[in-house]
Amino acid sequence: MRGMLLMCLAMLGAGVTAAATEGVSEMAIQLFGQERAEKRVATGAVFIDGLYVKGPYSISREGNVILVNGRIASRFKVESESARQAAEKAAADAAAAKEDPAAMGGDDVVSDEDGASVGSDPTPTLDDAPAAAGNAGEKRPSAIEERLAKRGQGGGIAARLAAQQRAKNLGAQSAKGSFNTEPTGDPEALFEEADYTYTPPSRPEPKAVPYVRPGAQKTMTQRLADAKEAVAKQEAKRVAQDETPAADEGDEIATESFDDLTEAEIDAYTKRFAKRRADLEKILENDCLLLLSSQTSGAQYKNRSVMWRFVLQLDKLCAAPTAAKLIAQWRTTLPAAYLQRIFDNRTANGEAMKTLILRVRREAKALQERSRNRI
């Protein structure tokens, strides 16, 4: 009886340990384990899906999900290598099937396997060649000789070879020449007998026209007008970009498939998840700005100076009716789509960030005092 009671208590304890937070897979916890937060971090600023999370922060992990203060902050994609290769092969087969006529069906297909189409034209047949006319013993010119005769180069192969030999001999005789072949006593005879006749060109050369850039041909007034027009176009384009926030640039939504996972893959995933949890904890200890997404594993962080500037400017920028000012000010530093999410949660963020703003102002003022005293 006592043994049965201990066994029930052990099973109950195991069930409590494996209990998953809402939104976390129990299978992921059994495969990759759990990590509880060993400390609470009082520095840094965390945004999850554009919503500010008040500190201090405790970062834990359950399976493939990282939680900040018990809230899902990051989710990793889990997929076995074999499943990934099978998915890639299925996608490649589907793409190939779109171009395969066999995939469309029909009567003009040999089979769904090779996808070869039956040709509509029958196989051509050749008739028997007609009998040769004339006497059998008479020698007829070949096809090559007939073709050459049509071009005016008839005479047979022997005649052509003889003509080529005559041209070759004539070229050799012409190469020898007869100019100054005999030695003379006059050393300047070569120059006296040289031909210095000037042969004018068939048509006169055109006069050189210097190249002038099109812009240099305009007057100063026209140049100033063009410059003002270009500046106005750039300003209009910038305003249009500010008023239209960019599309969501987040990572692909994480999917979970625990089938066919090997022991090596489970171990590699576990190490990767544990390292990410430790890295996020270290980032917050350095008083950084941390942006997370509950549906992906994407994470972006900025150092303390950027975090201070962002926190102190956020309240004023979010007072505008649209997110155009916020995006225009910070789009080179933070993703525009995430800035839009922060703006959408401006009411809740403003209430939750009051303590953070006071801390940042106090620490920034103390830093300025220390810098002034060192000088």
Image: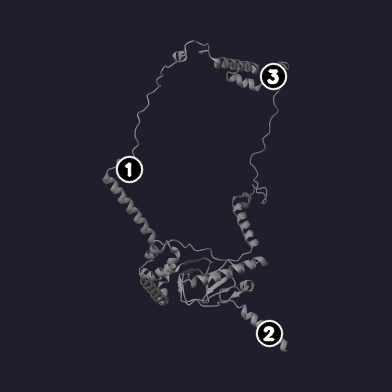
Of marks 1 and 3, the one in the foreground: 1
State which quarter of the image contains the N terminus. Answer: bottom right
Name the N-terminal-most of marks 2 and 1: 2
Residues at circles 1 and 3 in contact by the CB criterion of under 8 Å: no
- Can residue 240 be seen at all in this image of the molecule? yes
Q: Quadrant of the C terminus?
A: bottom left
Query: Picture coordinates of residue 304 (x, y %)?
Result: 44, 69
Front-lying residue, 349 or 364:
364
**Rendering quarter of residue 374:** bottom left
- Badge 3 marks a residue whose secondary structure is loop
Task: Work out whether residue 304 or residue 215 is closer to the camera in this orientation and state it.
Answer: 304
Q: Secondary structure at mark 1?
A: helix
Q: Which residue is mark 1?
A: 215
Vertical side of 356 occupied by 89: above or below: above
Q: Which residue is mark 2?
A: 8
Q: Where is residue 86 shown, x and y percent of the image? A: 64, 59
In space, the residues marked 2 and 3 are separated at their CA atoms by: 110 Å
Q: Which of the two labelled residues, at mark 2 and mark 3, occupies the earlier sequence position?
A: 2
Direction from residue 311 to residue 271 in the image, left or right = right
How far apart, in angstroms, are the residues tagged by discs 1 and 3?
79 Å
Type of the residue with mark 2: Cys
* x, y percent for residue 134: 70, 17
Task: Write the residue at 61% across / 68% down.
Answer: 271
| Image quarter of residue 330 | bottom left
* Mark-to-mark CA distance, 2 and 1: 90 Å
Q: Is residue 112 above or below residue 50?
A: above
Between marks 2 and 3 in the image, the one whose residue lies nearer the viewer? 2
Residue 314, label in figure: none
